[in-house]
Structures are given as C-alpha cells and as structure tokens.
Amino acid sequence: MTKQEIFDKIQAIIVERLGVDEEKVTRDTTFKDDLGADSLDIVELVMEMEDTFGEEISDEDAEQITTVGKAVDYIHDTMQ
C-alpha cells in the first residue's frame, strides 16, 4: 500500500470521526492543535486505524504520532 493510499484512508477516518472538512486534513495537520482532538478522540482514531490497517499501535508509539503525516509514515513502515 502506498503512502498516498494510507493517507486517503486516514483522512477519511478523521473526516468521519471528527467531522472536519477533507481540505483541512493534510500531512502537516496536527491532531490536537489543528483538529482540536482531545485524548479520547485520539484513542478512538488510533483504534480505528488499527482496525483499518490490521496493525497494533502501542501506547508509546501512539503518543509520538502527533500529525497525520507521522501516522501515515508509522503505518507505512509497520506494514513493510
């Protein structure tokens, strides 16, 4: 799966979960500052990404995923 395909899926999850416009979600978008996601939102996003991509994301790794781009890179790297 390419990084663009991963981004598209993560973007769709964010748009559905947080109700933001697709245009607001870029690789540089931060979950907390730009999207206003609280800790519960982030946990739910991580769980949905785990279900979507079939990869477990540890709590330690999840804390390091602060932007959409970092989420894309993490998923891409773990799927290799």
Image: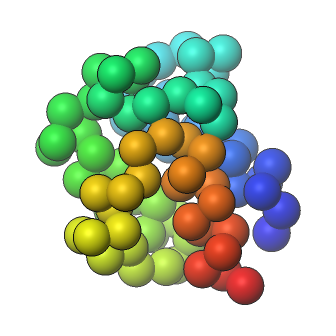
Q: Quadrant of the N terminus?
A: bottom right
Q: Quadrant of the C terminus?
A: bottom right
- In the figure, 5 relative to 1: above or below? above
Q: Is residue 9 visible?
A: no
Q: Position of residue 37 (x, y in %)?
A: 28, 30
- In the figure, 16 relative to 8: above or below? above
Residue at 27% across, 70% down: 60
Residue at 31% across, 29% down: 32
Q: Quadrant of residue 66?
A: top left
Extreme-bottom residue of the structure: 80
Residue at 24% across, 70% down: 59
Pick the residue in front: 45 or 3.
3
Q: Position of residue 57 (x, y in %)?
A: 38, 73
Q: Is residue 24 left or right of residue 16?
A: right
Residue at 53% across, 28% down: 29
Q: Position of residue 73 (x, y in %)?
A: 64, 60
Q: Is residue 59 left or right of residue 56?
A: left
Q: Is residue 52 visible?
A: yes
Pick the residue in front: 17 or 29.
29
Q: How many marks?
A: 0
